[in-house]
Amino acid sequence: MDLQSTAKVLAMEWGAKDFFVLVMEKLIFVKGFGKHWCKYPGKLGCCLQPEVDGLRLVSNTTSEFIHRVTSQSLAVLRIGSMEPGALLNDAFKEYEGDESHKADEYIRFIKDKLPDAILQCIKAAGEEFEPALQQSLLRVRLFDMYASTHTRKN
């Protein structure tokens, strides 16, 4: 991480004890505990508003909420995750994309953990803000009907 910048810091706020945000002229820098950090292009005229569980970044045209990614969301949505919920989510995506043979492989792999997988997806949906992602994670529950039928046959 290199912040050797001469840019003036316009705002700084803590977000729920987990991270802090620096707003500079052309850069927004987010730093969490440990080695976790990221930076985004800056927005002119934005301000930071602390909230109980995060930080709101408000500009003339947008309002964005910055918060810690929950463990349930990480378990289900992290790339390469081998958690049952992640594999069920991947199976559902393959099934929707007409790759049912790949979906079958995922289901066979997690058939003993199917109830846990469904619960992980439901909890992750409850922790997300994006409606399309919430719907996708909740639709996995409907996919359970297909998966249950498939596991009974085998």
Image (cartoon, rainbow, N blue to C red):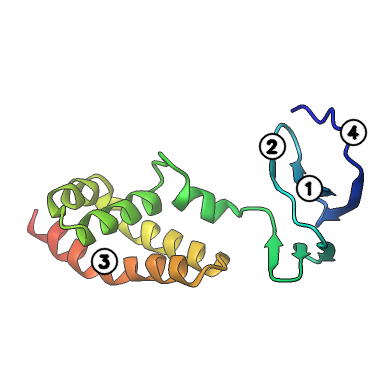
Q: Amino acid at mark 1?
A: Phe
Say whether marks 1 and 3 touch (CB < 8 Å).
no
**Disc 3, SS:** helix
Count of numbered circles in the view: 4
- Closest to the camera, between mark 2 and mark 4, is 4
Q: Is residue 140 left or right of residue 129?
A: left
15 vs 135: above or below: above
**Disc 2, SS:** loop
Say whether marks 2 and 1 touch (CB < 8 Å).
yes
**Disc 4, SS:** loop
Q: CA distance from mark 2 to mark 1?
A: 9 Å
Q: CA distance from mark 3 to mark 2?
A: 35 Å
Q: CA distance from mark 2 to mark 4?
A: 22 Å
Please tell me the numbered disc located at residue 36: 2
The residue tagged 1 is 19
Please tell me the numbered disc located at residue 143: none
70 or 154: nearer the viewer: 70
The residue tagged 3 is 144
The percent coordinates of residue 99 (x first, y second) are 16, 52
The percent coordinates of residue 30 (x first, y second) are 75, 45
Please tell me the numbered disc located at residue 6: 4
Q: Amino acid at mark 2?
A: His
Crowd band around label 4 with a 10 angstrom C-alpha radius: few (<14), some (14–19), many (20+) = few
Q: Amino acid at mark 4?
A: Thr
Mark 4 vs 3, N-terminal side: 4
Q: CA distance from mark 1 to mark 3?
A: 37 Å
- Closest to the camera, between mark 3 and mark 2, is 2
- Closest to the camera, between mark 1 and mark 4, is 4
Identify the residue at image location x=25%, y=67%.
Answer: 143
Mark 1 vs 4, N-terminal side: 4
